[in-house]
Amino acid sequence: KDIQYIYSEFYNKLEFARFDSNVGRFVGYTEYGVKQANYWNNIPSYISGLNAQRETYCQHNIGIWYGNP
């Protein structure tokens, strides 16, 4: 439960939108980012694909990061 997948979008070194697997949707941080977040949040297949990344990427690598040395 404490594993989190974060996907951020940047332009000119400024983060304008972020997907967080704990929130389950995009959050916009600029005017453009809010518009893009609303657009991306209305595509269910895209959101479910990013939620699946937590299982495929994060859960798969837990043993590498937290395994026995």
Image (cartoon, helix red, strand yellow):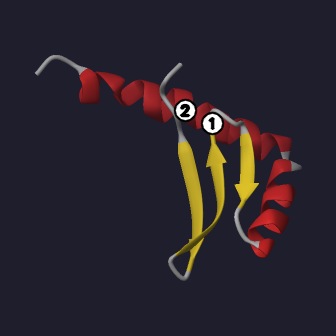
Q: Is residue 52 above or below residue 18?
A: above
Q: Is residue 43 above or below residue 67?
A: below
For label 1, the SS is loop
Q: Single out the mark in the foreground, 2 or 1.
A: 1
Q: Do the residues under discs 2 and 1 have CB atoms within 8 angstroms? A: yes
Q: Which mark is residue 54?
A: 2
Between 67 and 27, the one lying in front of the other is: 27
Amino acid beneath label 1: Ser
Q: Is residue 55 left or right of residue 21?
A: left
Q: Where does residue 17 sit, x and y in percent of width and height?
A: 67, 61
For label 2, the SS is helix
> In the figure, residue 11 lies in which quadrant?
bottom right
Q: Is residue 53 above or below residue 33?
A: above
Mark 2 surroundings: few (<14), some (14-19) or many (≥20) residues within 10 A: some
Q: Is residue 29 left or right of residue 5?
A: right
Query: Does label 2 or label 1 sit earlier along the sequence?
Result: 1
